Amino acid sequence: MKKFFVIITGLLLSYTGLSQPCLHEGRGFYSQEDIDRFHEYYPNCNEIQGDVIISGSDITNLYGLNGVIAIDGYLDIAHTERLSSLSGLDSLVNIGGHLGIYSNLALMDLQGMNRLISIGANFEIFDNPVLSSLKGFDTLANIARDVWIASNPSLVRLAGLKNLDSIGGMLQINNNNSLKNLAELAKLTDMGGELIIYSNHSLNTLHGIDSIHAGTISALYIYDNDTLSFCDVFSLCRYFEIPWANITIYNNRIGCNSRSEVKAGCDTSGVENLAVETSLLIYPNPAFNNITIETSEQSPHLGLSVFDVNGQELLSRKINHHLTNIEISYLPKGIYFIRLIETRKLIKE
């Protein structure tokens, strides 16, 4: 990779007014009757202030919970035998604590949570034997802490996470033996912890996590994915350039079987080849309020990152046009680095 220096000097809360808080101590639903009689026992209750557990062998649907728009504590849906969807939670907008969905023998997708926007803690979904997709979470944009998707043997796609853009903690995906790709994570840009991908035996590419800002990954672990050969995606190639990057890669298919193989892929194909013959200008230089990135009209889509002198990524975006204007007025005077395959010196006054 050629490098050059750039020197720069110079709706979520809408439910609150309509809600009727209740059940500060939380509530467990352990039978279909518990769910069906919820509004009879708690009329006008649409914001549950405590934790909610849904678990029972005879539960077939959640329609009795229709109208609940917020759960301030956590929500666990676990150990059900006949529940095939989450229909009935259609009004739910926010979960203040974690969301756990595990050991549901008949759950095929997550249809029914199609208004949920945020989860206030961890999102854990594991040991659901017939779950084939995460479809139903199409409005989910933010998860405040860790995401763990594990041991769902029928899970083929992450459909349902197409609008997820930030994770506050780690992202771990493991032991999903039918999972083929991560394409539905294309909008994910920020995370706050480790990226861990292992023992997904049908996964052959990491395309889909291309947009994650490298500076938000604290460590990278990729191993025991039998068919995984394409790991040189843009986000990981950027992470490889961070001097203190913590990277563990082994026992995948050739092409993604070691750190050196992935680095070679970044250097010789994919991300690197996009800009081999790219004509690149950055001006004005020195700059004050804005800079312009100019590429040749024949250039493909490129990615741009701005780092400070400590290697912290401050900005990441895709370059899709011949001319791209970027505001830099908020940056303090000093030296920064722009990476767009190459890096050039830029002075901000």
Image (cartoon, helix red, strand yellow):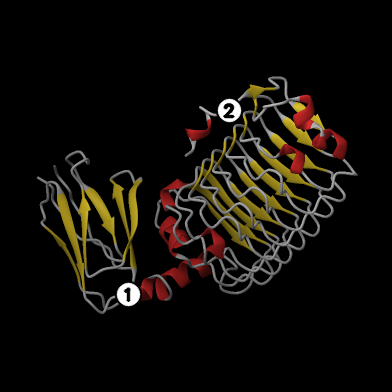
Q: Is residue 233 above or below residue 162?
A: below
Residue 262, can we see it? yes
* Residues packed near mark 1 inside 10 Å, few (<14), some (14 to 19) or many (20 plus): some
Does dot 1 land on a helix, a strand or a loop? loop
Q: CA distance from mark 2 to mark 1?
A: 49 Å
In the rendered image, residue 268, in percent from the top left (x then y), is placed at 41, 75
Quarter where residue 19 is shown = top right
Which residue type carries mark 1? Pro
Quarter where residue 158 is shown = bottom right
Whether tag 2 and tag 1 are in contact, CB under 8 A, the answer is no
Which residue type carries mark 2? Ser
In the rendered image, residue 201, in percent from the top left (x then y), is placed at 71, 67
Q: Is residue 22 above or below residue 310?
A: above
State the residue at coordinates (65%, 45%): 90
Judged left or right of residue 291, residue 32 is right
State the residue at coordinates (67%, 40%): 99
Q: Earlier in the sequence, mark 2 or mark 1?
A: 2
The quadrant of the image that shows the C terminus is top left
Residue 345, can we see it? no
Residue extending furthest toward the top: 24
Judged left or right of residue 179, residue 290 is left
State the residue at coordinates (72%, 62%): 132
Judged left or right of residue 232, residue 125 is right
Q: Residue 19, which numbered label? A: 2
Which residue in the protein does label 1 denote?
Answer: 300
State the residue at coordinates (67%, 32%): 74
